[in-house]
Amino acid sequence: MFFKKKNTIAVESIYQNIIKISRSKFFYLDLKLEDTFETRFDLIIFHAFLVFFFYKKKSISKPNLSQELFDHMFSDFDNNLREMGFGDIAVNKKMKVFVTAFYGRIAQYSKGMDAYYSNNDIKLLKKTILNNVYKGAKINEKILENFAQYMINCSNVFLDKEEVDNLKTNFQFPNFYN
């Protein structure tokens, strides 16, 4: 007999919010990102990080929700690769690359956000965004500053709420860009 995971509906809704915000024209028009598969992957990881960071910063142990969000996200990546025509071997190789990239980005974002919250230092966060999202390309400093501030503002909105309130809205990302 199969049992549905406790948080399946919440995880799906949170993930859909992540997908929706990652497709926002704001990132491609205002923050000058190229609309590619890799960029969308990076934006999904970027926004998922904000949910994971909330739990880390609040010291809330929700291993089931976090693990289910991770599993759901990577299942979606797997499905997308298959829809793009990749076979089993290619999908397995790409998924290993994705998982490695995920953990690297999460670690770097975490260091950048920790530096901001502990020392009000945004430099590491901007460098991390430049390296991960812009792949080290030359980008206008104001755009990079706006991207980092967007991340901080989203994090603050989540951190200013209790977990139950964030879950009620499925970690709805604030609309700072209209």
Image (cartoon, helix red, strand yellow):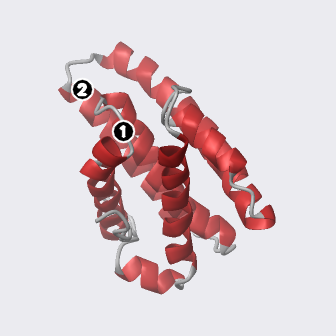
The image shows residue 34 at horizontal and vertical percentages of 33, 31
The correct choice, above or below, for 150 with respect to 137 in the image is below
Q: Is residue 60 left or right of residue 137?
A: right
User: Disc 1 to disc 2, how far (Cα)?
Assistant: 29 Å
The image shows residue 119 at horizontal and vertical percentages of 80, 63
User: Mark on residue 32?
Assistant: 1
The image shows residue 168 at horizontal and vertical percentages of 36, 82
Q: Of the residues tagged 1 and 2, which is closer to the observer?
A: 1
**What amino acid is found at the position of numbered circle 2 in the picture?**
Arg
Q: Nearest the camera: 146 or 78? A: 146
SS class of the residue under badge 1? loop
Q: Nearest the camera: 98 or 40? A: 40
Name which of mark 1 and mark 2 comes first in the sequence: 1
Q: Is residue 87 left or right of residue 43?
A: left
User: Mark on residue 144?
Assistant: none
Residue at point 30% right, 68% down? 9
Task: Please name the residue that numbered disc 2 is placed on.
Answer: 82
The image shows residue 92 at horizontal and vertical percentages of 42, 22
The correct choice, above or below, for 141 with respect to 110 in the image is above
Q: Is residue 135 left or right of residue 40?
A: right
Residue at point 20% right, 19% down? 85
User: Which quarter shows the C terminus?
Assistant: bottom left
Can the viewer see residue 103 in this picture? no
Q: Nearest the camera: 56 or 149? A: 149
**What amino acid is found at the position of numbered circle 1 in the picture?**
Lys
